[in-house]
Amino acid sequence: MHIDNLEALKTIKSILNVGCVTVDQTRNNCSLVVQSFAEIRDVICPIFVQFPLLTSKRLDFQDFHKAVLIKNKNLKFLSDANKERIISLKNGMNSKREIFTSFSINSKINVNPDWLMGFLEGEGTFGIKTGSSIYFQVAQKTTSVESLNAITSFLTNLKSKPLLPTNSKILPLNVVSTINSKTNVMSLVISSVDALYFYILPLLDSCKMYTFKVTDFKLWKMALILKIHGYYYLPEGKTLFLDISDVLNKRYSTGSLKDIDSIICRLSNSYQKILLKNPPFKLEEFIPHVDQARKFRNYSKSDIFKTIYIYENGKLIKGAPFDSFSSAHRALGLKSTSSTCNRYLDTNRLYKSKYIFTSKPVL
């Protein structure tokens, strides 16, 4: 694991009271290593027998456990035949595995909040895409598709908190699955702000995290609150949202960020100040976030005239400045209804690695 998770490994070691924690400073990673056969046999294996793994790792453990049992029966003398059996098991595990079917995998996948949180700490992402989109994602190799299907079923059956009234127009939680054909990784993504706030956030708030995901979640949660309550659509709210985006999911102890604690403290202080303002959106209306945003923009249009400046290599593009988003989009060959201007305006982020969008001229 990354060295950010050193304390989590120390916690695991203190609970299990086996193995040792090692640190590789040159690679910025740390490991919990258990080499004692007695500890493997008496402590590690019983855990995974009692609490079976739910991904294809379960197959690797089954083979590993078979090897442990073979050795345990032959502690005084391991015959050449048994050595060959163990080597054969080893050569079919982990990255060398070619068979991913087992009668026990399809029938015993029972996702619960505790298991999901453990899975999330290793394979989950609290994300923000360029400009504004916020999402929650879990991913795994397609060899564990049954587990991902079970996670999807678990998430889509979550109850909202607070319970949505019968007249609510908030849509049910929807999980979108995508497969990266190059890596054979399947991702489950939830990007609806409403689903994230009413379904996912209550689940995450009720569970405890032990790894650096605690920091990711704290930052992501602030961004989600800014979005759902409409603070994002205020200048100071959008600035804070983008500041959070710049920090989120970085390697906090070894990346480019210095003194992450003070950075998070600064972001938290700005966040608390913004929350003192009356929220632009009324969640008690229980209408979709996109409709809340549309109402806010329509109301704001009567008071604010937008001019859009688009720069390429420090120079205004042909036709700029523009008096509407639609005309700016057409100048770039986009549909007039595109959301590009709204996503990139005043973010200081490059669109297609060359365009900068501002509401004021760059001096």
Image (cartoon, grey):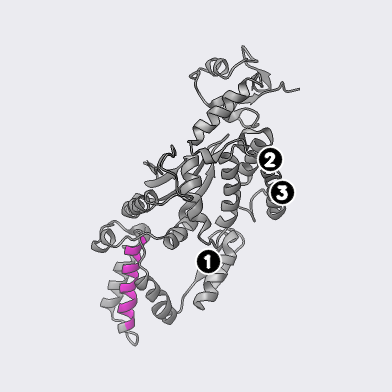
Mark 3 or mark 1, which has the lower sequence index? 1
The residue indicated by pointer 1 is: 31
Nearer to us of marks 3 and 1 is 3
Q: Residue at x 72, y 23 (%)?
A: 362
The residue indicated by pointer 2 is: 277
Start-end of magenta stretch: 57-72
Q: Is residue 92 or residue 267 the one in the foreground?
A: 267
Nearer to us of marks 2 and 1 is 2
Q: Tell me residue 191's x, y (percent).
A: 47, 41
Quadrant in which the C terminus appears: top right
Q: Which mark is residue 269?
A: 3
Q: Residues within 10 Å of mark 2 (few under 14, many from 20)?
A: few
Q: Is residue 65 magenta?
A: yes
Q: Which mark is residue 51?
A: none
Q: Tell me residue 122's x, y (percent).
A: 48, 57
Nearer to us of marks 3 and 2 is 2
Inter-mark Cα distance, 3 to 2: 14 Å
Q: Residues within 10 Å of mark 3 (few under 14, many from 20)?
A: few
Magenta: main secondary structure equals helix
Mark 3 or mark 2, which has the lower sequence index? 3
Q: Is residue 193 above or below residue 216?
A: above
The amino acid type, in three-letter code, at marker 1 is Ser
Mark 2 or mark 1, which has the lower sequence index? 1
